[in-house]
Image (cartoon, rainbow, N blue to C red):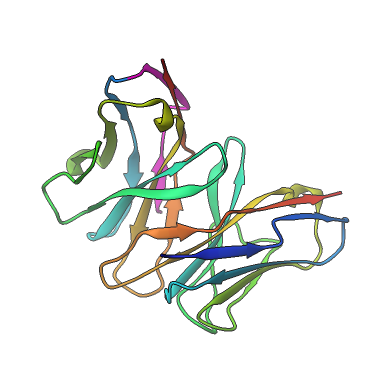
Amino acid sequence: AQKVTQTQTSISVVEKTTVTMDCVYETRDSSYFLFWYKQTASGEIVFLIRQDSYKKENATVGHYSLNFQKPKSSIGLIITATQIEDSAVYFCAMREGNTNAYKVIFGKGTHLHVLP
Amino acid sequence: EAAVTQSPRNKVAVTGGKVTLSCNQTNNHNNMYWYRQDTGHGLRLIHYSYGAGSTEKGDIPDGYKASRPSQENFSLILELATPSQTSVYFCASGGTGGSYEQYFGPGTRLTVL
């Protein structure tokens, strides 16, 4: 069965440092897509970055990058040079399948606190 | 820019009453989703759809129905609301053909008394 697990409930870091948030997933599909989303204090949920399972290179967007370890079914989110405004809840998500009717499920989220 | 709207934004309902949550997207996305968010559970998938006329059960469909009358609209229906359905509900749309990320609505806070 499809499953996404984020074990870190909360992380605190000092501004301008690098943080890594963990995510492991379970799937029977050979093709799948992994995502990270950010939920701000206002409740808004926005897409950050995506990794396609067939790509070996790690995705990077701005100061977000991924550490994709396929043999370990792991997709970590790395934020470099953290800023106060990076404080939010971060969700890992997975989409299975190549058909039109695909599910997207989420982990429970990691609350990041960036301290001055 | 991609846009997903939800109505109402806040709703108070009575136990046993019928509640309909509405979602509209102007992204022309085939796929739409309903999630609920509760403390400690993250986002849990209730129902989803891959096009007008289709609905699929997610991971927690019990007590909920969904309706997709058009490409743009996707509703979540609670026929007999219960206090355990008090939550924040998010609608999302997602594309296909290479653009797989989801766009979320602002959420609806539902309280069932």
Give the residue drawn at x 51%, y 83%. Answer: B52
Decide which of B87, A105 is in the foreground and name it: B87
Give the residue drawn at x 48%, y 65%. Answer: B3
Decide which of A87, B74 is in the foreground and name it: A87
Q: Magenta stretch?
A: A1-15
User: Relative to A79, is A101 above or below?
Assistant: below
The picture places residue A33, in percent across and down from the top left corner, at: 28, 56
The picture places residue B66, in percent across and down from the top left corner, at: 63, 72
Q: Quadrant of the C terminus of chain A?
A: top left
User: Relative to A28, is A13 above or below?
Assistant: above
Residue B9 visible somewhere in the drawing: yes
In the picture provided, is A35 more to the left or to the right than A70? right
Residue that extends furthest to the front in the rendered view of this protein: B1
Residue that extends furthest to the left in the rendered view of this protein: A56
Residue A7 visible somewhere in the drawing: no
In the picture provided, is A75 more to the left or to the right than B71? left
Q: Quadrant of the N terminus of chain A?
A: bottom left
Give the residue drawn at x 28%, y 31%. Answer: A79
Tell me which corner region of the image, top left, top right, bottom left or bottom right, holds residue B106: bottom right
The picture places residue A6, in percent across and down from the top left corner, at: 41, 35
The picture places residue B13, in percent across and down from the top left corner, at: 84, 56
In the picture provided, is B2 more to the left or to the right than B73? left
